Amino acid sequence: MRFPRPLAPGDRIGVTAPSSGVGADLRPRLDVAVDHLRRRGYDVVVGECMSGEGITSAPKDARAAELTAMLSDPAIAAVVPPWGGELAIDLLDRLDWDALAAAEPTWLVGWSDLSTVLLPLTLRLGWASLHSLNLMDTPYDPAPGLAHWLDVASVTGPVTQSSPGLYREGWDDYRAEPGTTTMTLDLEGPWRVLGGGGVDVGGVLVGGCLEVLSPLAGTPYGDVPAFGRAHADEGLLVYLEACAAPAPDVARMLHGLRLAGWFDDASGILIGRTAAPDAPGLTQQEAVADALGMLDVPIVLDLEIGHVQPFLPLVNGARARVVADDRRREITQTIGG
């Protein structure tokens, strides 16, 4: 694995929208987020591909060119999008993979639709990539026990995070409150182990949003089986989270990934908490059990890694250890070589 150098105050952070851009009504929140980075001591450059007028911020070739340029620019230490979207997949055969392979690795930060780019960077180039809050959510204070992505990207060595055991439903209204920085976590919800018992397992992290990653199985951009074979001695910790897919769709997607070999070298599977709907006769947990329960692999449910806030940053390509028992619910990642 190739880890980007640790982020430090004074470094430049690039902002571009590889998927959806930002409409005029949400520009105040964008300004707050950029100002937050600047107050933390970073130089920020905002790209041209930011329009919120369509489903994507610009034509695919323009988005691919700007993302490639930022990721291969040695003056830019990290690239973060405003948020996800729907069609980052249309960049994959437009990115200049040769230019990226020749460049020093740069932190690419994001989640949701950005998983579509984060994971191929790790699988194809061996770059560590950071599955974490996007720019529009960056001003939030981290929940107790969790780290901010800026801090994760700034260290070398172990980073331990523990579940706060709290979450919330819904989202803040950035139009009404563009300066909000605090999440109100008013619901209780610990991690759970499928089938009960405790888990203490290690491996190399890979994963992201289920809906956008499942179409990559069997393509040159989603060869998790090859990555797993390369790390078979350590095993993979495959993490996945569903955004909005109903339980039967989740079961089908997980079955498809299993049949495509994504869990062949898994030492453990981590599933994010979801607000996606159940179906008559099939809950979200039952969907996971139906597709993956036959594997001889521990499965931990309801991690803070998805579309239910708060958020636990994970580094694709990092070695990690997960402990879930009566006393601890924590994950330790090792950032760097």
Image (cartoon, grey):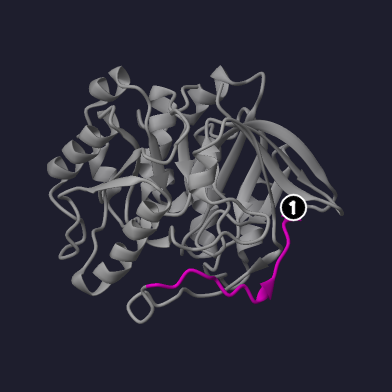
For residue 173, which quarter of the picture? Answer: bottom left
Residue 231 magenta-highlighted: no
Query: Residue at 34% across / 59% down in the picture?
Result: 35
Region in magenta: 179-192
Answer whether residue 218 is visible to the viewer in this image. no
Side of 247 where 79 appears, left or right: left
Answer whether residue 207 is visible to the viewer in this image. yes
Quarter of the picture containing the C terminus is top right
Side of 165 where 248 appears, left or right: left
Q: Secondary structure of the magenta portion, mostly?
A: loop
Helix, strand or loop at mark 1:
loop
Q: Give percent across and percent down for residue 334.
A: 62, 31
Q: Which residue is mark 1?
A: 194
Q: Give percent across and percent down for residue 37.
A: 38, 53
Identify whether 113 is placed above or below 72. below
Residue at the extreme bottom of the image, as rendered: 176
